[in-house]
Amino acid sequence: MINDRFITYFRENCFQNNEIELQQFLTEIQKPILRTIRIKPEKVEQVRKNLESDGWILTPTPIDRVFAMDRRADFDPLERRLGFSSDHLVGNFYIQELAAAHPVDILANSQISEDHFLILDMAASPGGKTTQLAEYYPNSFIIANDPTRERLPQLLQNLERMGSANTWITLYPGQLYRHHSEIFDRVLLDAPCSGEGTLFKGTDAVKHWHLKNIKEIARLQTKLLDAALHTLKVGGEMIYSTCSLNLIENEWVLQAMTEKYGDAFEIIFQKKFWPHIDGTGGFFVAKIRKLRSLWIKNESNENDETGEKSWKKSEPKFQITNNKDLKLWRGNISPWQPQSGVTLYEHTGKILSVQSDETGSRVRDSVFLMRYGEQIGVVDHGRFIASNRAWRYLDMTDIPIYILSDEKELDGYLRGEPISSSGSDEYILISYDEQVLGLEYRKSDIVSNTFSHEWRRK
Ligand SMILES: C[S@@+](CC[C@H](N)C(=O)[O-])C[C@H]1O[C@@H](n2cnc3c(N)ncnc32)[C@H](O)[C@@H]1O
């Protein structure tokens, strides 16, 4: 439901009283939009083939590897839910709205980067863009930050499903990163917002729309953008994005920073995605390049002639906490070895797999990490016990493979049913259609099923 204050604001501030365009906007903003998925770079052919044989029609969009999804006439919806397809469950694709896929694509200039960057995703949950950052920046290290604890389980699940050994989680209010000066090569600030652009999902984001609330959100957004600019290195680039369309949360937030920091940064790209023009959800994206350190105007010296003394550099004040229980793991994981680029850590008995650790070590001791890399097993009395997803990070070339024979057996595995298979007691990989689904242990001819409870078909 759309309230009158919202309509009046957009009529006067965005459509200059053009009643026809306003009505188009109001109609389109509420319509459901095409569902889109983002497929992992190395999985595009496999996922297309599998989903097409399940009755889906995939159409390319302006973003590489993002496809619009439609259903063939003979589609059987119950059996073919996208979220329960094996490719989704093992993290080969992410269901992501097209407009929401733009910020990271724009940050990376639509290219997969070879760089070893340190990247901050300042408002990360539920992780759609974090997992996209990991795809565009495979050699980089990403901090996924979000202070909202209720959203943490979803972030964790998405990171684990998609594979994210180069991602850590922190739970700070993003404003605190302000005191961690000039650390990050890239920053994504997909800011908390009023959500005007998400009405297509059936949300009631504008039911209680009020200028007072919008201004309140914009105050937080301004603080977050200020912090993002501080923590970005000189020469670094960042994205400021929201899923709202009013000026106050978007153009005015950028304007406030320009007034405060002058030519310390430049806006190198800016676009608002309108439902009635772009056919997407509503979205705003600005790409910013930092040109020099930020200096704050010192009001007492404002009239200084040279201007030299009237700016003072902000002091770094980030609170230092340590992750003292985190130790490099040099113990045995026999008979396997970590894959190249993987470093193993031990934290309270858990073995964690970390990629791009060297880049990450630039901040590891200065922020309190909620999660470091991805758990691949535990140590019990000095013995390594591998978990279901260890195959992603350990070299397991010699291990026996159990190939699920048909869709029925696949369905059973994805629902958590154990498998009967005669053979010696040992670890085996479970696979279907050339896709590894998990690592299991066979004992007395029964293969365990440790496929994650969160992702099981229900
Ligand atoms: C638009 S959502 C982010 C969506 C996410 N980037 C994605 O693509 O899946 C905004 C997020 O900002 C978080 N948030 C709220 N207050 C914040 C703050 N002070 N600092 C950082 N993040 C905050 C919310 O918890 C929410 O998860």
Image (cartoon, rainbow, N blue to C red):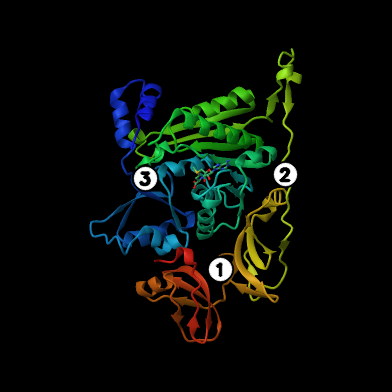
- Is mark 1 in CB contact (under 8 Å) with mark 3? no
Q: Is residue 169 placed above or below 326 in the rendered structure? A: above
Question: On the rendered structure, is 196 left or right of 188?
Answer: left
Question: On the rendered structure, is 361 left or right of 271?
Answer: right
Q: Secondary structure at mark 1?
A: helix
How many neighbours does mark 2 have within 10 angstroms: few (below 14), some (14-19), or many (20 or more)?
few
Q: Mark 3 vs mark 2: which is more N-terminal?
A: 3
Q: Amino acid at mark 2?
A: Gln
- Quadrant in which the N terminus appears: top left
Q: Which residue is mark 2?
A: 319
- For the view shown, which residue lies furthest in the right direction? 309
- Quadrant in which the C terminus appears: bottom left
Q: Mark 2 vs mark 1: which is more N-terminal?
A: 2
- For the view shown, which residue lies furthest in the left direction? 73
Q: Which mark is residue 201?
A: 3
Residue 282 position, x and y percent, is: 40, 37
Q: Amino acid at mark 1?
A: Trp
**What residue lies at 54% left-to-right and 29% top-to-bottom?**
253
Residue 273 position, x and y percent, is: 41, 35
How many neighbours does mark 3 have within 10 angstroms: few (below 14), some (14-19), or many (20 or more)?
some
Residue 300 position, x and y percent, is: 73, 18
Question: On the rendered structure, is 181 left or right of 259?
Answer: right
Q: Is residue 327 placed above or below 10 in the rendered structure? A: below
- Looking at the rendered image, the disc whose residue lies closer to the viewer, 1 or 3, is 3
Q: Secondary structure at mark 3?
A: helix
Separation of marks 3 and 2 at Cα, in angstroms: 39 Å
**Residue 140 in sight here:** no
Q: Which residue is mark 1?
A: 391
